Image (tube, helix red, strand yellow):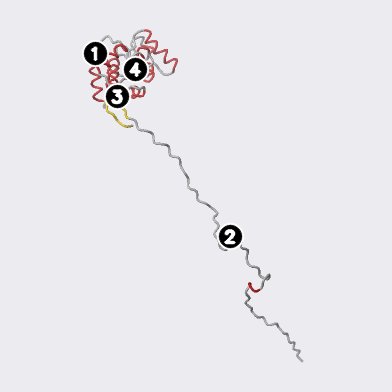
């Protein structure tokens, strides 16, 4: 004999309920805070700013067309020193060419040697008298540099008292080569004029102004 059991299951009814009608049972979401599905920016792109150095003002300078490295180095030195007039520059160049052809380690007579092996009449303007010759060596020892080098001799040249007597005249523009040559005589005190004035006119014709 079989026994049967009857099980009563409660009927499940799906009820759609508006949460607004049941206060307290399903409270509404809070009003503060980010809205749903908001995009949170984790990284911000920063624009890098780079400081730009102000543009260096351009300078007008004279260079010598077809000249040697030593001639142009001397020309640049003199302009940096404040001599700007074409004729004044050409006059100085013409005198140095006559004296040494811009070879700083030339001894009187034409031999190429060091300062200490010469004795008299040495360098760019052939420093001959004892006080001027030994003055070059003393200057190099005191301020550094070789007495046989171009740069040391140019620095010494513009520090000599003989140069300083005519410096302002050479820095004054607008004069002729002949006038600047008169000043140069009291600076160098040449015994033989030679071709220095012709050299000066030649330099004046080869000096070209450029923007650097």
In the rendered view, tell whether residue 69 sits above or below residue 6.
above
Inter-mark Cα distance, 3 to 2? 78 Å
Q: Which residue is mark 3?
A: 68
For label 3, the crowd category at 10 Å Cα-Cα, with few meaning under 14, some 14 to 19 and many 20 or more, is few
Q: Which residue carries the number 4 mark?
A: 168
Q: Which residue is mark 1?
A: 194
Gap between marks 3 and 1, in whole Å?
21 Å
**Horizontal arrangement in the rendering, residue 212 relative to residue 40 (left or right):** left
Q: Is residue 132 left or right of residue 26?
A: left
Q: Earlier in the sequence, mark 4 or mark 1?
A: 4
Q: Element under label 3?
A: loop
Q: CA distance from mark 4 to mark 1?
A: 26 Å
Query: What x and y, as percent, mark residue 193?
Result: 25, 12
Q: Earlier in the sequence, mark 3 or mark 4?
A: 3
Q: Which residue is denoted by mark 2 in the rendering? A: 34
Quarter of the figure with the N terminus: bottom right
Q: Quick one: label 4, few (<14), some, or many (20+) residues within 10 Å? A: few
Q: Residues within 10 Å of mark 2 (few under 14, many from 20)?
A: few
């Amino acid at each position: 004999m079989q026994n049967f059991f009857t099980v009563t299951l409660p009927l499940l009814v799906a009820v759609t309920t508006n949460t607004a009608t049941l206060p307290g049972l399903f409270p509404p979401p809070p009003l503060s805070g980010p809205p749903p599905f908001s995009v949170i920016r984790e990284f911000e792109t920063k624009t890098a700013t780079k400081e730009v150095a102000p543009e260096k003002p351009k300078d007008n300078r004279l260079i010598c067309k077809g000249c040697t490295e030593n001639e142009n180095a001397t020309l640049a030195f003199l302009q940096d020193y404040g001599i700007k007039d074409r004729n004044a520059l050409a006059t100085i160049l013409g005198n140095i060419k006559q004296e040494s052809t811009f070879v700083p380690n030339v001894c009187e007579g034409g031999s190429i040697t060091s300062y200490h092996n010469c004795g008299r009449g040495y360098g760019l303007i052939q420093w001959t008298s004892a006080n001027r010759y030994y003055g070059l060596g003393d200057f190099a020892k005191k301020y550094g540099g070789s007495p046989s080098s171009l740069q040391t001799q140019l620095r010494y040249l513009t520090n000599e008292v003989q140069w300083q007597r005519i410096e302002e005249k050479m820095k004054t523009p607008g004069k002729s080569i002949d006038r600047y040559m008169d000043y140069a005589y009291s600076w160098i005190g040449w015994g033989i004029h030679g071709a220095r004035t012709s050299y000066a006119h030649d330099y004046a014709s080869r000096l070209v102004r450029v923007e650097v």
